[in-house]
Amino acid sequence: ERIARIDCHRVMMTVAPNKVFPADIAFMAQQGVLVSLGHAEAKGEDVHGALRAGARSFTHVFNAMSHMTAREPGMIGACLADRESFCSVIVDRLHVDDTVMKVLFSAKPKDRIMLISDAMPPAAGGPDEFQLQGRRVRRVQNRLNLDDGTLAGSNLTMDEALRNCVTLGVELEDDVVQRADDGTESALALGKLVLTATPIRDVLHRRQRQHRRRLTKQGVERRHRRLPHPR
């Protein structure tokens, strides 16, 4: 009830389907909370029960969730088999193998996949070493690691996620931009919410214009430096 009363428009919350009862998921969904599933070693039957109760998405699929085997779908198998649910994914080519990413793109409808960054401070120019819940995180090349080598978030930005998708063979205009833009908007609009976030396509075009302006400015400055000093 406290979560449902939070005054921040729409709330998305990740729960473990093997720890939170379907009745509680149903109550949260009825109150307008967007329930996502993740961070759990749940069985397929737990996931199916959560989806029937009103859960609508999976949090960074393939990471921090039970794997699929021949006799147990786990969270990953349940996600891939359900074509109505949304799923977010970190396309930094570290959290998820390229081949596994291609399986996801083939299994889920394109309007059900959301690109996310799971980014930490270094992605925005922050320090290469910082504390996360009392544990040290260090940037090693492009990875963010705990001291034991475990991945701890990413150094990914959304434009890099888009480029990685294109590298994997996904058509930019038809698929990737929709995943980064419309997919998130659709997930957050499962009720009557109208999301007003800036579309990813607009962000990319703005960055291209800024890059061209920088190049033009640098060219003008170089030409200016070559001019003889007035006597």
Image (cartoon, grey):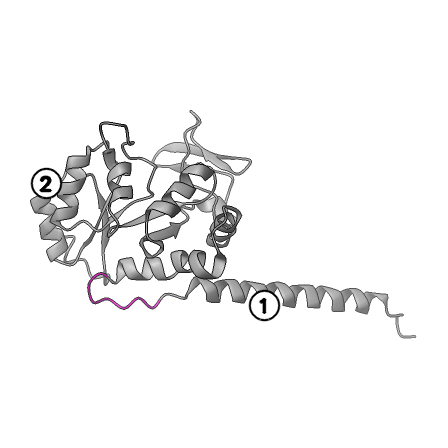
Nearest to the observer: residue 62 or residue 99? 99
Q: Which residue is mark 1?
A: 209
Q: Determine whether, in the image, residue 214 is placed left or right of residue 58.
A: right
Q: Determine whether, in the image, residue 9 is placed left or right of residue 92.
A: left
Q: Mark 2 is on which residue type?
A: Phe
Residue 190 placement (x, y as % from top left)? 22, 61
Residue 213 placement (x, y as % from top left)? 64, 68
Nearest to the observer: residue 107 or residue 202? 107
Numbered label attached to residue 2: none
In this rendering, the answer to whether 55 lies above or below 17 is below
In this rendering, the answer to whether 35 lies above or below 218 is above
- Tally of numbered discs: 2
In this rendering, the answer to whether 209 lies above or below 166 is below
Say which label, 2 or 1, has the lower sequence index.
2
In the rendered image, residue 139 lying in the magenta stretch gets the answer no
Q: Residue furthest left?
A: 23
| Residue at 36% over, 65% down | 197
| Residue at 41% over, 65% down | 199
Q: Which residue is mark 2?
A: 21
What secondary structure is marked by label 1?
Answer: helix
Q: Is residue 1 visible?
A: no
Secondary structure that dominates the magenta span: loop
Question: Which portion, as a residue range, is magenta?
Answer: 190-196
Instruction: Count residues near mark 1 (Cα–Cα under 10 Å), then give few for <14, some for 14-19, many for 20+.
Output: few
Q: Residue furthest right?
A: 231
Residue 223 placement (x, y as % from top left)? 81, 68
In this rendering, the answer to whether 94 lies above or below 187 is above
